[in-house]
Amino acid sequence: MKVSIIGGGGLVGSCAGFALQAGGIVREIALIDVNPDVAEGQALDLLHGSSLLSDQVIVSGGTEQVKDSDVIVITAGLRRKPDESRLDLINRNVELFKKILVDIKSHGTKKDAICFVVSNPVDVLTYLAVKELDLPCSQVIGLGTALDTTRFCGILANRLNVPPTQVSAMMLGEHGDSMVAVWSAAQIAGLPIDKYPGVTPTLLAEVESKTRGSGAEVIKKKGGAGFAVGVAIADIVHSIALDQRRVLPVSSLQNGAYGISDVCLSVPTVIGRAGVLSQVEVELWPKEIRGIQNSGKVLRETIDKVL
């Protein structure tokens, strides 16, 4: 399997490249960036460590790399300027993303290629990719709340001093302010979260609040997320490559789940080699359903303003 990363010279794209290299599952990794020297440097750095990790083809190049790619990961994006509004940043990123989609379309893609959007605002840009690319909507996914979910699990594990891999919990809805913590299905080692020793409503509220602010905290302290988003991207790519059909909180076009349609957001989604295989509408608490529906409303309003 060949994976191309548009924005592969940046922090997110290069961390995704390294996570894919360390995973050793995909056959070829192509790094693409508006700055070709940076992309080439990142590819060389990965190549130099390849003898200790896995036997893969690692290259850099232009967007022509997408034409024979199985998964096209788009991480390129702009950062907010001082005193810039969220809507202004969204408008600038939408314009950049439209140019990237034009480039992709000019080279063409494989019929079974998966477009995997990471750039923010991820739900809005995933919706734009669904509308603009010549691919079935099932072959366009966004990172959605997958990163928020792994942050959620990691923070909860740290707070309770339990192994992170034994924590099962999800954030759903918008990757943004209206995201929804799904406490109704949260578990530790298969045990209901509210039954686990040491768990209190105050602790759960603290974990949720810290998760919501974790992205801003990382940006403030180190400039931007890299490692966590890289492994989250690789986790989803591996589910595609191995046709694992795992249920993941990724963003995709909604067609009725929880009463939501014609926006892209995260609900439990079965992901395999063909992309979105199905969306799982599990029973949630009423307030969680209302929260996801509110995410749909927020995203619809944003889409109507910028697209």
Image: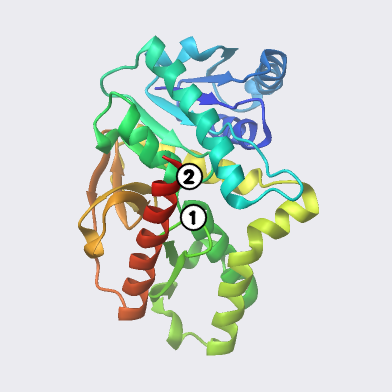
Q: Which quadrant is the N terminus positioned in?
A: top left
Q: As shown in the figure, which amino acid type bears the numbered disc 1? A: His
> Residue at (34%, 17%) from the top-left corner?
109
Residue, disc 1: 175
Residue type highlighted by circle 2: Val
Q: Position of residue 120 (x, y in %)?
A: 54, 43
Q: Residue furthest front?
A: 305
The residue to which callout 2 is attached is 122
Q: Secondary structure at mark 2?
A: helix
Would you say residue 281 is visible in this rendering?
A: no
Q: CA distance from mark 2 to mark 1?
A: 7 Å
Q: Nearer the viewer, residue 175 or 167?
A: 175
Q: Please give left or right for residue 220 compared with residue 24 in the image.
A: right
Q: Secondary structure at mark 1?
A: loop
Toward which corner of the image does residue 216 lie, by quadrant? bottom right
Q: Is residue 161 above or below residue 122?
A: below
Rendering coords of residue 51 (x, y %) = 64, 20
N-terminal-most mark, 2 or 1: 2
Please give left or right for residue 243 compared with residue 99 in the image: left
Camera-side residue of 252 and 29:
252
What is the quadrant of residue 128 in the picture?
top left
Q: Which residue lies at the image location 66% right of the left edge and 43% below the top edge?
A: 226
Q: Tell me if residue 180 comes above or below residue 246 in the rendering.
A: below
Q: Are marks 2 and 1 in contact (CB under 8 Å)?
A: yes
- What residue is rendered at 58% in x and 66% in y? 212
Residue 59, given in percent of the width and then of the height, sits at 58, 13
For mark 1, does the 10 Å Cα neighbourhood hold few (<14), some (14 to 19), or many (20 or more) residues? many
* Residue 104: mark: none
Q: Nearer the viewer, residue 276 or 255?
A: 255
